[in-house]
Every structure is written in C-alpha cells, then in structure tokens.
Image (cartoon, helix red, strand yellow):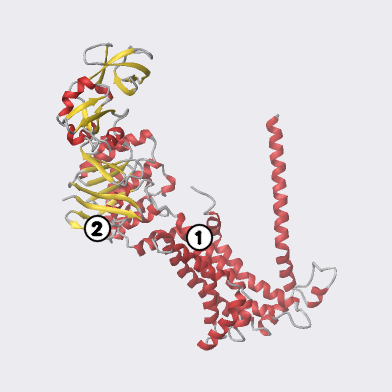
Amino acid sequence: MSSSITRRGSILSGIGYYALALMATAFFAFPIVWMTLSSLKSDADISAYPPRWVFAPTLESYRKLFTELNAMDALINSAFIVCLATLFAMIAGTLAAYGLARFDVKNKNFIAFEVLSIRMLPPMVSVIPLFIIAKQLGIFDTPWLLIAVYTLNGLPFVVWVMRVFIQEIPQSIEEAALIDGCSRFECFWRVTLPLLLPGLAATMVIIFMFAWNEFLLASILTSSEARTLPVIAASSIKAKAISWGLGSAAGVLMSLPIVVLVLLMQKYLVRGLTLGAVKG
Amino acid sequence: MGIEVRSVYKRFGAFTAVNGVSVDIKDGEFFVMLGPSGCGKTTTLRMIAGLELPSDGQIKINGRDVTYEEPRHRDIAMAFQDYGLYPHLSVFQNIEFPLKVRKIAEGERRKKVHATAEKLGIAEYLNRKPAQISGGQRQRVSLARALVRNPRVFLMDEPLSNLDAKLRATMRTEIKKLVTSLGITTVYVTHDQIEAMSMADRIAVMRKGDMVQVATPLEIYDRPRTEFVADFIGSPPMNLFPAHFDRKKGLAASVQPFADSLSGEVADKASSFADAQGQFFVGVRPEHLLIVGDGAEGAASASVDFVEPLGQTTNVYVDCGGHKFIVVTDRTEARVGDVVGVLVAPGKSRLVAPN
C-alpha cells in the first residue's frame, strides 16, 4: 500500500524533473534556434510580424558573409590566433601550475597572486599601452599581437585551475614514478599528464572560448589584416541599420567550432568539471 | 654494506623533524622504524628514498654516498601507504612501469611481470585497472611493482595501515617471508608495534625526531631503555614504578611501592639510568607480576580495582597505596575489592630511564 504510494510519488516527481529540464533547455536553446533560423531567412522573412516559422530557406546571408565581409579570412585568422594562444597558454600555464603545486618555491602564494592580478586589470586599461608596444615592435594588425594578448589573458586562469587539478593527484603516485626510475619531467609526462587530461580538456575549452569570443581587444588591435570573426560579426551592425541575416549567419559560424569542440571533449569535460566535487 | 645513516637532520623552518639520526642497517636486514605519528620515522625513510633532502648529514646505500642523489639513481623500491598505483594504467602496466622506464626489452619485461605477479597471487588481475581491485590486491600490485626489478633496498611506508585487521595479519607474514627469501635490505615504517615485533630483525623506536632505542624486538621488549619505549611497546604496557637514586649516597634510596624487594637488584646499575635529579623508573612487565596471598613475604599489598578476563589471560588492575598498575595472570579468583599481595618475579625488574 504505502510502497505503491511512494512509487506513484516518485513517478510524478520524475515527470516534474523532466518538465523542468525541458523548460530550462527550451529557455537556453531558444536564442540559438532563433539565430539559426534567422540566418536561413530572407530579409523579408526576418522582418515579418508575426514571425514566420515556415519559410523558404536561403543561404543568401552566408553568401554575403563570405563575399562582402571576407568571413573566410577572418575565420582563418580566428582559428590560427585562438588555437596558438590556447596552446601556448595551456603549456606555459600547466607547467607553471605544476611548479606552484609541487615545488617548494619561495613566496609561492605571492607569485600565484601576481599571476592572477593580470586578470584583475580591466582589459580597456591595457589597450593603449598594448597599442603603443605593438606599433613599436611593428606587429600591429598581425596575428602575433593577438596571440600574445590572448595567451597572457588565458594564462592566469590556466595556472589557477590547473594548480588545483594537480594538487588533487596524490603525491605518492608521482613519488612512486620518481622511485621507479623517472626524472621529474618523465614523471610529469608519463604519469601526471595522463591523469590531468580531464582537467586539461575542461580548462582548454574555457580559455578557447574566452579567446574565440573576445571582441574588445580584437576590434582595437587589428585594422584589416588580422581581423577576427567577432569583429566581422559586429560589422553587420551599421550606423543606419542592422543586417539581421548577416549577423545571425556570423553568429552561427562563430558558434560551430565551439559546439564541435565541446562535443569532442564531452567525455573529458564531464569528468573534468566535476573532478573537484566528487572524492573517491 | 646496507644503508648507513650519519647524523641526519631534517628541519622544516623552526621545526626539527629528524634530529641527528645515525644508524647502520645491515645488508639483507629487515629494519623497522616504529613510533607515533610525527616522530620523524616517515621523514627519515623519505630521506633514504631521496624524496626529501636532509638539512644536514649523510646517507650511504651499499657504500655509495647518495645524500643528494635523485631517487631513480639509488636502486631502491618503495611501497606506499596509499599504494601509489598509476590509476590510468592496468595492473600489468603498473608492474611493468619500472622496467619500461629503464628501457628493458619487451619480451623480458613480459616474462618478469608474469613471474612477479604469479609470486604475489595477482596473475588473474593483470588486465584490470587499480580501481577495479580490492585494497589487499592493490597492495600486492604495489609490492609486485617494487620487487619486479630486484632492487637492492626496499622501503615501505606503513604499507598495511589501510587494510583491515585480518588481511593485515596475513600480509604481514607474507611480506616478511617474501622479503626474507629475496634477501633484500628492507626499511619498514609503522606505528603498529605488533607489525614491528613480528616482522623486524631490528627495531628503531623513534620519538620527536630521535632514535630512542635500536635493538632486536625481544631486546626492546625485555629491556626498554626509556620510559617512552617501555610505554609504547607491549599491550598492556610495562608497569613503571618511580624510583630515586641519591647520587651522594650511591644507592637506590626508594622504589615505590616495592621498596624492600627491589632495592638490592636495582642499586648497582641505577646511576647510569637516573637523570640529574636522580629520578628513574623500575619497570616490570605485567606478566612478571604475580598475585599471591596478602601478607606473603616481600609482597606489596594491593586492592583489586578492575578485572578484565580475555580468555587466555586476565588483566587485573590493582591499586597499591595510590600506585595503579596492571598484572597479567592466567585465570584468577580475584574479584574487585579484594586485597591481594603482588610480587615481582625474581630477576624480572628492569631499569628504565626517564624521557
């Protein structure tokens, strides 16, 4: 008797959870669906009211994106800049985090805080010095400037997050490797790194996203050669009108790599994002 | 040859973890460092392993000075309390790891891994990951990984403390047999006196960074040098009776409560045990006290506080004019509140120095 009541209760609460989950998903998915639909509509369909759900799809906006706005160049720029910046930030950041987590460094906490302080500076403050430095070095409007900037931007996050992931690995595992015949670096490479993969994946996705979506610095520190996708996307907003179709198409183009990246990393991400939470 | 530790210190800031330890561990010896947590036993072991550098002093392994050598150049193996297995590798790969790092050919690696796994009874788990086997099996894997390359020295840091009591008892004998049959010099750290007593060729009892006494298990049990050793080894611990030695008169002036019966035995040796004030202890193991009738000759009269029958033996807690101590006897008629006589078995009282 009582068990059938609780069973019915658990079914009801199950349905409740599903309904809530569906609502949350709909809430978050709506803008993305709307953007994707808009990118496939003609200008007339976009401005129609009430909105048209059934329409003849067209790739006109994408054509314009690639011809008028040179999206392909921007895509290549973005990919090159962001991939390299992510790679550099991950390598330097993880090694720094390892040092801070494992070695007896003097003033360790001060150094860690110093690294974090880069992050505290409002990006706007650094724009003018960066601009002047770039002019002096002759790297203004080249990918290298943004690569350096994004690497530095991502570094503090990598150091702080990876430090925690490294500290979670029991020291005895590394000590066992040292005694089994590894040098410090071999130990890091053969033992620590494989165990860090989930953390590395999670961290990498996040700093990749930071850099991929970064607009402010990219818009000021580039003019034509090194323009990235966010800058292109923003140029669909003109002084007199907003080109919704073009903007949506740019938005879809920008989102795709992130979606692909997250899907590829999904296996690691779930483990990485929950690693600190679940012990055992 | 073995291991020579020469006046080794380890300081962490103002704290001295290891305070000038010197010891010679013989080739093939099973040497146990025993002590409560924070006594410096693990730090000493880690310095022998090369995982910590000494603040001062020298460590030699098989005649070679390795004080500042990296662990991998010391030809040692180590087993950890939490096993230290590589979670991303299978049991086979875990055992194979030290051979692989040392670039030993694959065929030989395979042969050695299988032979070692066979010896430790884990051959059927070779394809599993460490997370998929039990604690006892994990410890076997860590032993296999340590032994697979025939190290000269085997270091073990409380390898059994994460196992349940029953498994600990079987692993104890197994480890001892295995290591003895291979003739490897072993340094074993534990806080468990039973492990130390049952496995060691020699025990070093450590306290606050010092090696208080280094001797064979029975020597330590029979003749604990200090109050700390007497209290730490043996369960129930040794009874310690405060005694006083008057340096001017050169005699043991008092031993409470056995003033009459003990003085003679004690007097001639007392001066080397007594501290500056002439304080020392006379220690008697609980099983060396005899319960006799009240008023028997030389017996101290005591009242029974509590009786603990354990089956094979019985612990009797007695109170003798404010001195409380424990007598271990066979089954006894004594009841709480009885007044009995307590006698020290002849030749069984020991002198014990204060800490």
Residue matched to label 1: A199
Dividing the picture into quarters, in which one does residue B72 lie? bottom left
Report the chain holding disc 2.
B
Position of the C terminus of chain B by quadrant: top left
Indicate the position of residue B262 as horizontal and vertical percent values. Answer: 20, 23
Q: Nearer the viewer, mark 2 or mark 1?
A: 2
Amino acid type assigned to the residue bearing label 2 in the image: Thr
Residue matched to label 2: B67
Relative to A50, is B297 on the left or the right? left
Measured in 3D between alpha carbons, the distance from the residue under mark 2 to the one under mark 1, in whole angstroms, is 36 Å
Report the chain holding disc 1.
A
Residue B223 visible? The answer is: yes
Dividing the picture into quarters, in which one does residue B233 lie? top left
Amino acid type assigned to the residue bearing label 1 in the image: Gly
In this rendering, the answer to whether B110 lies above or below A240 is above
Classify mark 2: helix, strand or loop. Answer: loop
Relative to A21, is A77 on the left or the right? left
In this rendering, the answer to whether A2 lies above or below A162 is above
